[in-house]
């Protein structure tokens, strides 16, 4: 995890592409994940990034198990977790260090740790380097989208060399390019604006954002240890210091990085708070400032906003271009990653002729309410940890103590019951209608550790793949399908799986016929078996998982054909048209025609942008 100076990524006089299946504006976490989802299937992707050099400062710091599962789906989870602090406890503490509340979820319902802290330049560098496997993905730095026009066939995207950019190699100031504007055009099927809170794509569409701007300023100070063995051993966890006199956030990060945030008092100015002496005085209460390099110090405010529209025909918004989330739950970048996963498989399906275009309408209907729930939760947490009233703070502490004195409520709080669940709003998702409030349709399915027929332990998604999966509890789900239903699923790349309880695979003296297309596994800890039983009180039920692992249906095996007909209808397969591409040839890094810096990078940035692309 050694840092190296960021280098400009230049096009080396290569001709710029003029055609693509999808153009993505913005190379933040959202755009990177979307490029992976599409690139993995061989689709032609062009990513336009206006900044000519890598932005080497951290913005986002946290990701959760849902996003780790998404990273798993693009074959990046193992690489990314190398540079993360996994399963890190989160605390509410008083100024004297007394712990008021502790969030320490250890269960892994989706197969990955729930609380993980990262250093964003490392995460983005790894994701960017991961794209070198795909010669069909082109990253073009130093090019800004300036206009686009769309019709029934596609989008014409006009871009030019960036003229004024925020970051340069040597300074924090804005810089002006000396190059010719070199206006060029790309013809694409779709355009995705993942270009952050100041989205050009959103502005060109004339789409407004609704919500609230918060005037309370905070000072962010990003630090780097000079000696990794000194300075931070006494701060091993993430802390909200709930001090009415001065609310503080102390955020752990890997490789000796650390962040402090201090809420400004009334009358304190940006100029005063950003002075070296002020920063040193604030830090000295928690660390020895001489043991750290100050990477950045900046006063900022934050927003809680949602775009009024996320799709205009062939142009879509994702990440901060669609919604801006206060940082207190760490869900800004994570919401963008969820956008990329949801939109990615649907764009992929349309491009491959596995869904009609109307399926893209479900992107906003599914993601909007969940993103708004995350924003609401972040605002509530902000109110909880930034109280300056002594009376209000005392009431908060008493309330928390009461909750934690009740065993069930304590478990609920420590396992993150307050966090919005990965569940889509009833009536606004691709899937069968819920039969009751707790029905699993439109919910993210669990991912257990399973034992294969070869005696290996692996996560279930490694077997379900990146398309649909039909999972039968102690039954072969394919035998309950009509020939036409089976053909639909096979055309969609569906995997057929039988899930048994651990040590309950059929055995005995009778040699049973084996379906070579069927995958048989055992649920090691019983988590998914229990989930099946709670979801429906049926003998040998079957679950149909979408490519993003949300449940399309959980039903009796005798009702499968009806569910498949609903799938055909909701995917608008009658109107599906596209070019089915073969899997791309995975190339070595030195073969790839995307020119990407290979080292972990860290460079100075011009300002603190609370938006995350």
Image: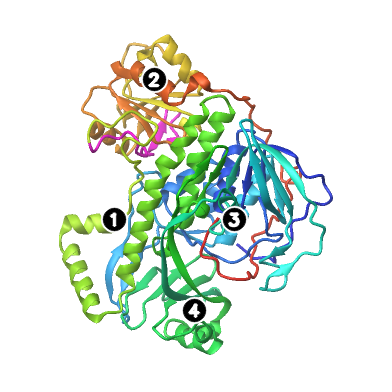
Q: Is residue 443 magenta?
A: yes
Main SS, magenta residues: loop
Task: State the residue at coordinates (47%, 40%).
Answer: 342
**Dot 1 corresponds to which residue?**
418
Q: Nearer the viewer, mark 3 or mark 2?
A: 2
Q: Nearer the viewer, mark 4 or mark 3?
A: 3
| Sequence-earlier tag: 1 or 3 | 3
The boundaries of the magenta stretch are: 437-461
Tell me whether circle 4 and circle 3 mark residues in contact (CB < 8 Å): no
In the rendered view, tell whether residue 211 sits above or below residue 455: below
- Badge 3 crowding class, 10 Å Cα cut-off, few under 14, some 14 to 19, many 20 or more, is many
**Dot 3 corresponds to which residue?**
124
As measured in the structure, the alpha-carbon distance from the residue carrying label 2 to the one carrying label 4 is 59 Å
Task: State the residue at coordinates (50%, 42%).
Answer: 341
As measured in the structure, the alpha-carbon distance from the residue carrying label 3 to the one carrying label 2 is 39 Å
The spot of residue 508 in percent (x, y) is 31, 16
**Dot 2 corresponds to which residue?**
564
| Sequence-earlier tag: 3 or 2 | 3
């Amino acid at each position: 995890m050694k840092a190296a100076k960021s280098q400009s990524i230049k096009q080396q006089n290569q001709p710029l592409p003029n055609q693509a299946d999808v153009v993505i504006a913005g190379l933040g976490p959202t755009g990177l994940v979307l490029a992976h989802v599409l690139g993995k299937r061989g689709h032609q992707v062009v990513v336009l990034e206006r900044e000519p050099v890598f932005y080497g400062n951290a913005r986002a710091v946290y990701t959760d198990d849902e996003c780790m599962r998404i990273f798993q789906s693009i074959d990046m989870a193992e690489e990314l977790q190398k540079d993360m602090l996994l399963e890190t406890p989160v605390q509410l503490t008083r100024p004297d260090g007394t712990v008021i509340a502790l969030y320490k979820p250890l269960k892994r319902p989706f197969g990955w740790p729930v609380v993980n802290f990262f250093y964003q330049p490392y995460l983005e560098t790894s994701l960017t380097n991961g794209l070198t496997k795909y010669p069909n993905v082109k990253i073009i730095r130093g090019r800004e989208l300036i206009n686009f026009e769309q019709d029934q066939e596609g989008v014409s995207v006009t871009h030019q060399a960036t003229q004024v950019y925020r970051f340069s190699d040597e300074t924090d100031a804005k810089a002006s390019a000396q190059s010719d504007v070199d206006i060029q055009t790309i013809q694409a099927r779709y355009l995705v604006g993942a270009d952050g809170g100041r989205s050009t794509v959103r502005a060109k569409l004339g789409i407004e954002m609704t919500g609230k701007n918060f005037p309370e300023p905070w000072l962010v100070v990003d630090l780097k240890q000079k000696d990794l063995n000194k300075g931070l051993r006494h701060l091993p966890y993430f802390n909200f210091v709930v001090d009415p006199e001065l609310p503080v956030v102390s955020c752990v990060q890997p490789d000796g990085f650390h962040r402090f945030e201090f809420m400004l008092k009334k009358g304190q100015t940006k100029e005063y708070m950003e002075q070296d002496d002020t920063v040193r005085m604030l830090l000295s209460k928690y660390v020895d400032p001489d043991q750290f390099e100050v990477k950045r110090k900046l006063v900022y405010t934050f927003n809680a906003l949602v775009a009024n529209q996320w799709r205009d025909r062939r142009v879509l918004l994702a990440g901060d271009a669609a919604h801006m989330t206060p940082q207190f739950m760490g869900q800004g970048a994570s919401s963008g990653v969820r956008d990329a996963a949801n939109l990615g498989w649907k764009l992929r399906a349309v491009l491959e002729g596995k869904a009609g275009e109307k399926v893209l309408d479900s992107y906003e209907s599914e993601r909007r309410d969940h993103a708004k729930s995350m924003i609401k939760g972040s605002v509530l947490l902000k109110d909880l940890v930034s109280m300056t009233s002594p009376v209000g703070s005392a009431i908060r502490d008493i309330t928390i103590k009461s909750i934690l004195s009740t065993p069930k409520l304590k478990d609920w709080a420590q396992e993150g019951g307050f966090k919005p669940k990965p569940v889509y709003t009833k009536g606004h998702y691709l899937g069968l209608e819920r039969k009751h409030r707790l029905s699993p349709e439109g919910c993210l399915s669990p991912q257990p550790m399973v034992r294969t027929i070869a005696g290996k332990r692996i996560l279930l998604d490694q077997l379900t793949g990146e398309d649909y999966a039909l999972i039968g509890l102690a039954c072969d789900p394919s035998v309950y399908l009509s020939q036409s239903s089976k053909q639909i699923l096979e055309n969609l790349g569906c995997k057929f799986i039988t899930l048994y309880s651990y040590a309950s695979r059929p055995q005995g003296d009778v040699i049973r016929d084996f379906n070579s297309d069927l995958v048989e596994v055992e649920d090691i800890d019983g988590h998914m078996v229990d989930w099946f039983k709670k979801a429906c009180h049926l003998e040998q039920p079957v679950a149909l998982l979408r490519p993003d692992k949300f449940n399309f249906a959980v039903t009796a095996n005798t009702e499968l054909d009806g569910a498949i007909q609903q799938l055909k209808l909701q995917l608008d397969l009658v109107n599906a048209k596209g070019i089915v591409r073969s899997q791309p040839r995975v190339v070595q890094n030195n073969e790839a025609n995307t020119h990407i810096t290979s080292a972990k990078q860290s460079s100075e940035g011009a300002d603190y942008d609370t938006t995350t692309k």
